[in-house]
């Protein structure tokens, strides 16, 4: 079934005979009517209303590590507002806040791959020292399944992979995987703004200025966040099949 999460009637129909919901709906780039407020926040509120009307008790809600109320970061604020709506509801819920995801089609890596493919050097914005806990998408799926199978909760959990990598580490791993050798050139944040501004005019930009604002925000959590909570060891990025990178 397909539908618009802004359409409460369609949501209610979709929730017929449903015991639990996994909410993955979100955007990281605004375009036209697809705004953070409408999609990340409003759709979540509509879903919660429809769940209540249909008597669906359990929700696994995918948020983002770093979600918070600071208006300087509109995407992260929208994810936090959606979390707040979930926490204010009377449904049972688990909010998962994953770090950057890796796996088939992972959007975070598009700009890295594009740059390595087409640029003679790699412009490392803001030093590349931002820290991440890359989480394999299949391990995230394992967390979601565990949430659905476990006892009803009302909790918010940070989840990430078993190691912390800097952005420079991630670029080096992608470079190694693709067999691309590029000289790293440090670029200050302000110098990357014109490229992001032009990209922001595209339907599917590689990066926007709002995303550049988040470049300096660490996105890491405890290495045991998954194993200690869900009872299975997540895999390091380099221990997964990375051939999907070449298909970006």
Image: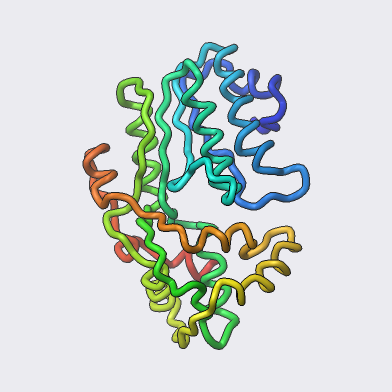
Query: Which residue is pictured at 62% across the width and 23% down the height?
Result: 14
Residue 105 seen from this side: no
Q: In which quarter of the image is residue 156?
A: top left
Q: In this view, does 83 lie to the left or right of 193?
A: left
* Image location (x, y in percent) of residue 20: 46, 23
* Image location (x, y in percent) of residue 33: 76, 42
Query: Which residue is pictured at 54% across the width and 45% down the height?
Result: 70
Q: In this view, does 117 lie to the left or right of 133?
A: right
* Image location (x, y in percent) of residue 125: 51, 73
Q: In which quarter of the image is the C terminus?
A: bottom right
Q: Is residue 66 left or right of residue 157?
A: right
Query: Which residue is pictured at 59% across the width and 25% down the height?
Result: 47
Scheme of image coloration: rainbow
Q: Is residue 82 above or below residue 125?
A: above
Q: In which quarter of the image is the N terminus?
A: top right
Query: Which residue is pictured at 64% across the width and 23% down the height?
Result: 11
Q: In this view, does 162 lie to the left or right of 93?
A: left
The total number of labels drawn is: 0
Seen from the viewer's position, the closer of residues 125 and 99 is 125
Seen from the viewer's position, the closer of residues 230 and 138 is 230
Residue 134 seen from this side: yes
* Image location (x, y in percent) of residue 127: 44, 74
């Amino acid at each position: 079934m397909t539908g618009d999460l802004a359409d409460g009637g369609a949501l209610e129909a979709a929730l017929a005979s449903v015991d639990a919901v996994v909410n993955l709906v979100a955007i990281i780039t605004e375009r036209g009517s697809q705004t953070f407020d409408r999609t990340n926040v409003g759709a979540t509120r509509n879903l919660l209303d429809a769940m209540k009307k249909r008597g669906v008790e359990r929700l696994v809600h995918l948020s983002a590590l770093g979600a918070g109320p600071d208006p300087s970061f509109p995407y992260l604020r929208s994810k936090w507002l959606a979390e707040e709506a979930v926490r204010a509801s009377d449904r049972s819920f688990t909010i998962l806040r994953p770090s950057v995801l890796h796996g088939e089609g992972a959007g975070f890596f598009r700009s890295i791959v594009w740059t390595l493919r087409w640029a003679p050097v790699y412009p490392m914005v803001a030093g590349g020292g931002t820290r991440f806990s890359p989480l394999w998408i299949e391990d995230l799926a394992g967390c979601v399944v565990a949430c659905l199978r476990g006892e009803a909760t009302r909790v918010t959990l940070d989840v990430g992979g078993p190691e912390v990598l800097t952005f420079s580490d991630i670029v080096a791993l992608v470079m190694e995987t693709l067999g691309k050798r590029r000289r790293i050139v440090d670029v200050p944040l302000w110098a990357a703004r014109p490229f992001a501004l032009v990209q922001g005019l595209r339907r599917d930009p590689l990066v926007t200025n709002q995303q550049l604002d988040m470049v300096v925000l660490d996105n890491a959590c405890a290495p045991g966040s998954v194993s200690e909570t869900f009872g299975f060891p997540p895999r390091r990025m380099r221990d997964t099949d990375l051939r999907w990178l070449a298909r970006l």
